[in-house]
Amino acid sequence: MKLVTCSSSRAAERRPSSGYTAYFIAACVLDFNRAIALVVITCVVLFFFVYDLLVARFAKHIKHFFKPLGQCLEKNRKWMKWVFVALAFIGLIAWLAVDTAKRPTQLISFGGVCMFVILLFIASKHHRAVSWRAVIWGLGLEFVLGIFIIRTEPGYQAFKFLGDQIQALPIVVFFSCVMSILYYVGLMQYIILKISWILQVTMGTTATETLSVAGNIFVGQTEAPLLVRPYLPHMTKSELHAVMTGGFGTIAGSVMGAYISFGIDASSIIAASVMAAPCALALSKLVYPETEESKYKSKDGVRIEKGEERTILEAASNGASTCVSLVANIAANLIAFMALLEFINKAFSWLGGMVNYPELTLQERSEVITTFALCGFANISSIGIMLGGLSTMALERKGDMAKVVVRALMTGACVSFVNACIAGILFTSRDSVDCRQFFGGTEAFGNKTYHLYVCCQDIFGSTVNANGTLSFLNDWETVANATTAFWNCCSFYNKTVCTAEQWI
């Protein structure tokens, strides 16, 4: 009887995996291009599943097998380190020379990265203690992530897929609710642990600060430190600085969703949040290097607790209710940002008109770079939020937190700027749209999308008020539905050209 029960349980365990395998194969066979995002996600999950399985069963054997190699690497670490740095530097220069040959303006963004690194080193608390391993690996990981997300088809499709799914949902409530559920079941803790493991192994940072920064990809500046709350009282000042920098340099998942709902390109803002994690650790260790002995150099003693909710429905309800206070703050910031962007566009258009180029505005590349630059919480009001949140978790360290918070704020702002520079180096327009055909489709005005934003800006810039009569330029006069498209755009975007006074 026991044998039958065991066999039945094993068969039940195989059914979900067999079903998913069949589904995965069918998706790839029917349309592989459509299934690229699924392939990427599956490969990542399989990698960590196999890794955990090997470590759990053969950890001692693996360590014993690779012990001679480890000893050899340790013995020759100094010269191998410099060889690796030299090869990486030569490879970077060669890649930049080839990649920017036809787009030399992208070198401006590379100069921006160098400028920020130099300025932050000058402002460093302990110049001689800077861990260049953390800095180089952090920026390198950010660069590799950027190449994967922005340049490769699998990465681009995976993040575009995530953005498309998010756009079709009530954004803020959805994100907050899902994050709360994932924390309740423990899945989010698992994902954060894996991301932090990669950062810790490559950059040499401690477990606690890495966990907190990795958590900032998904949650806000006061929620992420909850992952390491029991360890905050014993963290070094450098680790506290890293925790704060991670909060200032990234945005919460719910806020990310709200930005997307206001028309910000979804794939760009998701990519910016992911890329900001290694950058935050790198720049944090550049500005405030470690000079104390940390107690958390190994991840073995660090455990992540689950949420306090007792049921999955309670977790979903709490997640949905906590997002309500975000909406007004998000809306105010976005209104200010959109108004500022419109002012800059008008100023550029006026300046361009002086040399017969009135179309001069912030185009797609500049908008993507701006999205990366604004993907953070580095503002003055966040100082109070950060100190208030962290001090309640470790009241005895409030004095140390107050000493490093301003430096962390400036570093967090630079994280977003360096992120934008990396995006500027890598960005190439691959998703152009024919606005005439786009407005002719039935789903053009279904949701706020990036294509809708671009096409509405195009028709706004081609609209002329001739004695109170609506007319169009730049081939829009031949489009039959131009007037309808114009007023539909006005219902989505509050442009001055749409106001009634302009047409009296």
Image (spheres, rainbow, N blue to C red):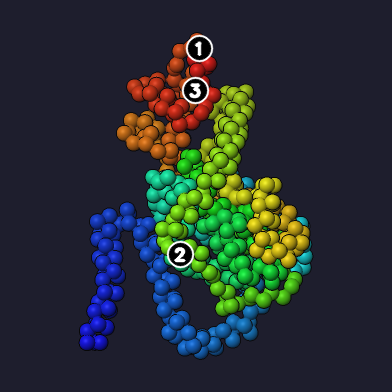
Q: Is residue 219 above or below residue 71?
A: above
> What residue occupies the far top of the structure in this picture?
467
Which amino acid type is shown beneath numbered disc 3? Cys
Quarter of image, res 366: top right
Dot 3: element: helix
N-terminal of the pair, mark 3 or mark 2, is: 2
N-terminal of the pair, mark 1 or mark 3, is: 3
- Left or right of 433? Residue 142 is right
Q: Report how far apart the C-alphas of labels 1 and 2 lie in the structure.
A: 61 Å
Residue drawn at 27 percent across, 58 percent down: 27
N-terminal of the pair, mark 1 or mark 2, is: 2
Q: Is residue 266 above or below residue 354?
A: below
Which amino acid type is shown beneath numbered disc 1? Ile
Q: Can you give x and y, in whole percent of width and height, for residue 309 in the image?
A: 48, 62
In this view of the protein, which residue sits in the foreground, 7 or 162?
Answer: 7
Q: Can you give x and y, in whole percent of width and height, for residue 71 in the image?
A: 59, 86
Residue to which mark 1 is pinned: 504
Query: Circle 2: is it few (<14), some (14-19), or many (20+) Cα within 10 Å?
Result: few
Tell me the number on the disc at residue 310. Answer: 2
Q: Can you give x and y, in whole percent of width and height, for residue 344 in the image?
A: 61, 32
Q: Are marks 1 and 3 in contact (CB under 8 Å)?
A: no
Residue to which mark 3 is pinned: 498
- Left or right of 483? Residue 222 is right
Residue drawn at 53 percent across, 43 percent down: 327
Q: Are marks 1 and 2 in contact (CB under 8 Å)?
A: no
Judge depth for marks 1 and 2 and give the one in front: 2
Q: Report how far apart the C-alphas of labels 1 and 3 lie in the structure.
A: 12 Å
Which amino acid type is shown beneath numbered disc 2? Arg
Dot 1: element: loop
Tell me the number on the disc at residue 349. Answer: none
